[in-house]
Image (spheres, grey):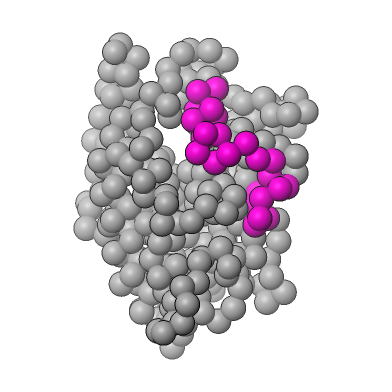
Amino acid sequence: MSSTLTLREWLRAGPFSLVLSQGFFVFPALVGALLAIEECLQDDGAPPRPLRSAIHAVSGSSSGALVAAFVAAGHDLASLPSVVRGLDAREIVAVDFRGGGLVSGRATADALRRRLGAVAMRDCPTPVGVSAFDLASRRLVAIGGDQDLAAAVVASSCVPLLFAPQRLAGGRLVTDLAFFLDAGGARALPSAPKSGRVLSVCCDDWNLRRLSRVEGAVTLSLRHIARVAPWAVATLGDRALREARLATRAACDRPLEQRRGGELGVDARGPSSDRHLLFVLLLLVGLLCLKLS
């Protein structure tokens, strides 16, 4: 069943909270989608309106936490493509075998801090929350408050075995189990506007809809977007960003459809095909090469 309301019309109807899904290195695709959403907010002849002016609060898990952090810290979306192109594989996945994983996360946090700025989460212009799995209590927790923003992003993104568990301020030891527990990225959302409006941007290529579904949200589902490997963020990341941006532009003028759970949503389909197994094999070979180089 379809609604007569398009995604563009929904976006322009008032403030909303934004939730961003997990997915392995999908942050370029999420950035591309947000750039197109920002374009959708613009009225003909009106002054430019940044996306952050429409966002009540933002949250994310894993890769979604990374993009949520830049949005919450007040960075212009137009500056993020150059951030994506400038990321170096040895900053993101600095293999050192310390702390119980291939990557300790220290270099990753330092690289993010240089780009985000050293800022506590509570000081962000837009309220932000990210999720991670607490190994002591064995439950998903929302990270916020006085936690360092860059450290929180790494904590939400530390995929087990690849990244070591991260110790947050206060001593809590956490890891990333977002695929199972917070695929949609909504469990740490600080709040929603009084209208209850929430937009979920989900990378469906990496998520099962029954796990990533955000109750009550309008969902933009990114599908068939180029995969991104850690050692090729500058090239494949740029491609994923462009594909997601073009796909979201096209989706903005399609009517929202009612999905199985009753929520409204629309698909943004890119041109890339699904090759999960091949991608994972190439990923493992690439990580080995990074270690040996």
Q: Quadrant of residue 141?
A: top right
Q: Quadrant of residue 186?
A: bottom right
Q: Quadrant of the C terminus?
A: top left
Residue 144: % across, % down:
71, 44
Farthest bottom residue in view: 4
Q: Quadrant of the N terminus?
A: bottom left
Q: Say which of 163 and 49 sits in front.
A: 49
Q: State how many labels appear.
A: 0
- Magenta highlight on residue 115: yes
Q: Is residue 208 above or below residue 54?
A: above
Name the residue: 55% across, 81% down.
13
Q: Quadrant of residue 2?
A: bottom left
Residue 76: % across, % down:
48, 56
Report the side of 119 relative to 250 (left or right).
right
Report the side of 271 relative to 76 (left or right).
left
**Span colored in magenta:** 106-129
Residue 226: % across, % down:
27, 48
Name the residue: 54% across, 29% down.
109
Residue 6: % across, % down:
42, 81
The reply to whether residue 60 is visible in this rendering is no
Name the residue: 59% across, 24% down.
165
